[in-house]
Image (tube, helix red, strand yellow):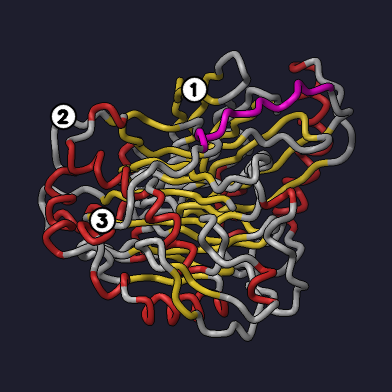
Amino acid sequence: VIHDFLAGSAFAEALRDELLGLGFRGRSNDLLSLRHALCEEFQVWLSAVTQIVLEPTIDISCAKYEYTDVLLCHDDELEGRRIAFILYLVPPWEKSDGGTLDLYSTDEHFQPQQITKSLVPSWNTLVFFEVSPVSFHQVSEVLSRKCRLSVSGWFHGPSVARPARHVEAPLARSPHIPYDHEILYEWINQVYLDLDSQAQIQEEFEERSEILLKDFLKKEKYQQLCEALESKEIQWGSRGPANKRLYEAAEEDSLPDTLKKFLQLLRSEALFLLLSNFTGLKLHFLAPSDEDEDAGEGQAADTSGHSSPKPEQEETEQPANGNSHQPHQPENTPEAQDGSGTPVCAGELRRWTHGHYTLVHDSQATEFALDLLFFCGCEDWDPEYGGFTSYIAKGEDEELLTVNPEDNCLALVYRDKETMKFVKYINHRSLARLNKHPNRTGFWDFSFVYYE
């Protein structure tokens, strides 16, 4: 940390005004002077102090953070980056304003563990650190209406060897458990058990690769579920690491019976078959195969194990990839299977509140799958709070689909190998909801994935 980095307060103020667009003239003398200072005198000094060989290449950019802006945990690692720097041009700043530079410790797998130091931005102060496999850091959420302005970038040098990325163990996948159709009639709104309704849902789903089923559970069962979620007996564990996710997941052994039974429903043979009828995917042996449909013999099994006529499909399934012209890939390809040819699922009960999120990351698995999200406790939840699930095309920023939390709603989304997802950071605005719901800081969801 170097205080009073720029000589003379007038120069720092002029630079700030240029960056904020006050009298901005494009290639300003102040910006050129800063670049020259960093690339010449300071680079030589920095290389000598750190004993890191630096090249002439330097990246510089300006960042302006305002209320609720945040930059989540990352390590800055990219080919050739050796030293990161940040020059703060901020008004008087307190820790309560947020926007701190948080530095993480790491575990034996070089994964971020916990915040060990928080640096409060300070006028005309420069911070620098070595970019490495353990240089995890974040800019915490700005909680005030002040403008957090900075100039930041990287000094480059010869790349160094990096350890192999740690591969996480995924959530365990399991086949369905043997519960018959009676469990559906106990929990689910009768509308969704009607075969004509299922045929309509499947037609819409096959056209759009996603659907939102409102009032999915019977009203009284949904109320029981919400009451059970408030139980103080539930043990919640934080899910990380911070460069990939931060939320709470329930320990299933600690759940009240109502929640255990709902998880049994989500894993039940009867629901696998119902999801087949909703989507046209083969998640149960009674679901019609592609060969049956091609032969004009397509039939949708009802949830009691019989079969009934199914409307002829006019279009092939299109995964949630935003490209209606992409050739259809058969669902029985090895990539779409779990290896055994048996449909399986994996899932958990999650609790979401201020500061929680998931991130798209390099090691995120991408494969053909059906995502199921069921939401509870979302009264008066505003999308500007975050907490919604966003689907994007792999390697692109374009948003394909957003699923917002909504009470007693079941969201189904079919994604392909080019589709990734994340849950948007839940920001400080979400605390305004406490005015209407003093005991409700967030919401819950049951998040499951089904594989053919």
User: Callout 1, which amino acid?
Assistant: Gln
Q: Residue 244 sits in which quadrant?
A: top right
Q: Residue at x 15, y 64 (%)?
A: 219
Q: Residue 77 sits in which quadrant?
A: top right
Which residue position holds label 3?
A: 182
Mark 1 touching mark 2, by CB under 8 A? no
Does 220 lie within the magenta span? no
User: Callout 3, which amino acid?
Assistant: Glu
Image: 406 above or below 374: below
Q: Residue at x 20, y 62 (%)?
A: 379
Which residue position holds label 2?
A: 233
The magenta stretch is: 161-173
Q: Is residue 443 visible?
A: yes
Q: Nearer the viewer, residue 164 or 96?
A: 164
Q: CA distance from mark 2 to mark 3?
A: 29 Å
Expressed as whole percent of the image width and height from the top left, the position of residue 8 reads 59, 41
- Looking at the image, residue 83 sits to the left or right of residue 424; the answer is right
Q: Residue at x 16, y 29 (%)?
A: 233
Expressed as whole percent of the image width and height from the top left, the position of residue 107 reads 55, 16
